């Protein structure tokens, strides 16, 4: 009996000891999580947040029994997100035992390797391109992959700081989105593309109209290299930007020139643009005031207006043309948007990009107007495909969000983003350390370019901008592939 009591006392003491050690361990993990700046989830949700990484790791082994396969999820599947995460963290990006990518579905693209691939010593950096050759201040850059339009307001201050610093490290440009430019954009010295939205945030007078004086003041900033007039975007073609009132802080309200705490909803179009002539009028007005390259961004849907635009350019002369066109895919989506617009309106990039490029060739304006494109291009293969189809540069929004730590929580419009990227809640923002995340942004950019280079060299060209449609084939409904230059042949030049 005495022995039994002794055992019980020993077990009790051991249990109390283990319980005490457990409490100390939790306290220790809490302190470590709250003070570290590498993982936003752990910092915002100390101790509990660790389970995400545990289950994420275990999911690699149990996924085949309980969860979706690697390439089944939307809008971005696990394989795509995983590649971005690994690239941003600068860890191994290789895979073993064969690809999980199904090569049989209609629309699958494949790059055609050359019998004599480019040797490493023969490879060259991407060539430079010039935007606005006739401008007082043209923009010359060799950047292929850039940060797409995401407004300060839609994104938090730490996120903008990280993107800006990352862009400076990577040598790419950062598009401001329609929310105006802030000190967070400018602090790093990165190249900036200033977007003019339908509400004219940052360049509007007291009546909400475009203000030449404010345009000139922005153009005086050497960091701002180009101006982009936003006509529509992929998440909501036909509707203006939507920023919920709870995300309109004092700082954001001051930059945009709007009331604090009130929903910021832009007009669904520029009131002064009602025809193709009006587009050229606004482009040339901004270019005359700023002296810098000016273009416009649009989701392509009904396309007859493009022919009208190019006809009008040829009537007025090539000097009237925009310096670039940014084509956004219908499957864009970083911002809040009505689901009918997000799901059903506009053309995807695989159709709109060759359409626009072919029209420019047909009207003899391809050398005059540069093409930038955006829309779910977050991996090297997608970027290389866009270059092969005729794009001069590629923008990505969600790819860079993943590099910041985005977990596709689908809460961008609720001010509850668990990683601090799209929220203005100070508690959640503290999990996003701009210094460490800027490094990840630059790493992601670096390995995009590296991967695009691998594909280009495999196809036998020395640099990425030499990729052409003949280097890519796409699966048809008969199960066989066809080269993209046969599927999308260039139109005969008319002018």
Image (cartoon, rainbow, N blue to C red):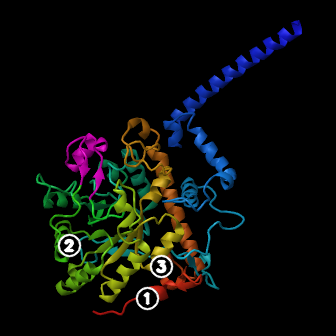
| Quadrant of residue 47 within the rendered picture | top right
**Furthest residue in direction left, as rendered:** 207
Mark 2 or 1, nearer chain start: 2
As measured in the structure, the alpha-carbon distance from the residue carrying label 2 to the one carrying label 1 is: 28 Å
237 to 85, vertically: above or below: below
Element marked by disc 1: loop
Q: Position of residue 202 (x, y in %)?
A: 22, 54
Residue at label 2? 279
As measured in the structure, the alpha-carbon distance from the residue carrying label 1 to the one carrying label 3 is: 13 Å
Q: Position of residue 271 (x, y in %)?
A: 16, 64
* Label 3: few (<14), some (14–19) or many (≥20) C-alpha neighbours in 10 Å: many
Residue drawn where x is 37% and y is 84% of the image: 358
Residue drawn where x is 22% and y is 82% of the image: 313
Residue drawn where x is 20% and y is 66% of the image: 290
Q: Which quadrant, please, contains the N terminus? A: top right
Residue at label 1? 489
Is residue 40 in sight in this rendering?
yes
Residue at label 3? 388
Q: Which residues are magenta?
A: 240-265
């Amino acid at each position: 009996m005495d022995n039994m009591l002794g055992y019980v006392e020993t077990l009790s003491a051991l249990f109390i000891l283990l319980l005490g050690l457990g409490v100390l361990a939790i306290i220790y993990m809490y302190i470590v999580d709250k003070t570290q700046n590498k993982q936003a989830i752990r910092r915002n949700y100390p101790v509990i947040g660790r389970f995400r990484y545990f289950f994420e790791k275990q999911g690699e082994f149990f996924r085949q029994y309980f969860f979706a396969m690697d390439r089944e999820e939307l809008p971005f599947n696990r394989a795509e997100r995983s590649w971005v995460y690994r690239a941003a963290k600068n860890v191994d990006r290789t895979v073993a035992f064969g690809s999980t990518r199904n090569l049989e579905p209609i629309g699958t693209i494949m790059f055609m390797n050359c019998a004599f691939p480019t040797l490493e010593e023969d490879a060259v950096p991407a060539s430079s391109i010039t935007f606005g050759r006739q401008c007082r201040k043209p923009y010359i850059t060799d950047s292929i992959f850039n940060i797409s339009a995401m407004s300060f307001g839609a994104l938090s201050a730490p996120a903008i700081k990280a993107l800006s610093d990352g862009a400076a490290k990577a040598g790419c440009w950062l598009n401001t989105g329609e929310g105006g430019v802030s000190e967070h954009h400018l602090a790093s010295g990165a190249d900036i593309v200033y977007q003019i939205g339908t509400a004219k945030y940052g360049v509007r007078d007291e009546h909400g109209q475009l203000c030449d004086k404010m345009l000139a003041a922005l153009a005086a900033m050497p960091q701002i290299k180009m101006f982009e007039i936003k006509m529509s975007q992929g998440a909501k073609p036909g509707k203006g930007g939507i920023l919920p009132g709870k995300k309109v802080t004092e700082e954001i309200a001051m930059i945009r020139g709007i009331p604090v705490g009130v929903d910021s909803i832009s007009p669904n179009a520029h009131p002064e643009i009602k025809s193709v002539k009006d587009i050229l009028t606004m482009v040339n007005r901004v270019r005359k005031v700023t002296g810098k390259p000016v273009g416009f961004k649009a989701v392509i849907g009904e396309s007859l207006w493009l022919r009208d635009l190019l006809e009008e350019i040829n009537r007025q002369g090539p000097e009237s043309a925009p310096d670039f066109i940014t084509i956004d895919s219908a499957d864009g989506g970083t911002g809040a948007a009505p689901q009918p617009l997000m799901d059903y309106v506009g053309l995807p990039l695989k159709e709109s990009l060759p359409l626009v490029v072919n029209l420019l060739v047909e009207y003899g304006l391809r050398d005059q107007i540069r093409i930038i494109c955006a829309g779910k291009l977050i991996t090297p293969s997608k970027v290389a495909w866009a270059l092969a189809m005729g794009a001069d540069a590629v923008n990505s929004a969600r790819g860079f969000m993943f590099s910041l730590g985005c977990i596709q929580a689908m809460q961008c419009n609720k001010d509850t983003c668990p990683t601090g990227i799209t929220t203005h809640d100070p508690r959640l923002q503290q999990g996003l350390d701009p210094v460490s995340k800027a490094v990840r942004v630059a790493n992601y950019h670096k390995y995009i370019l590296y991967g695009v280079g691998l594909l280009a060299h495999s196809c036998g060209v020395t640099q990425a901008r030499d990729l052409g449609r003949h280097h890519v084939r796409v699966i048809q409904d008969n199960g066989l592939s066809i080269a993209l230059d046969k599927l999308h042949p260039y139109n005969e030049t008319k002018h």
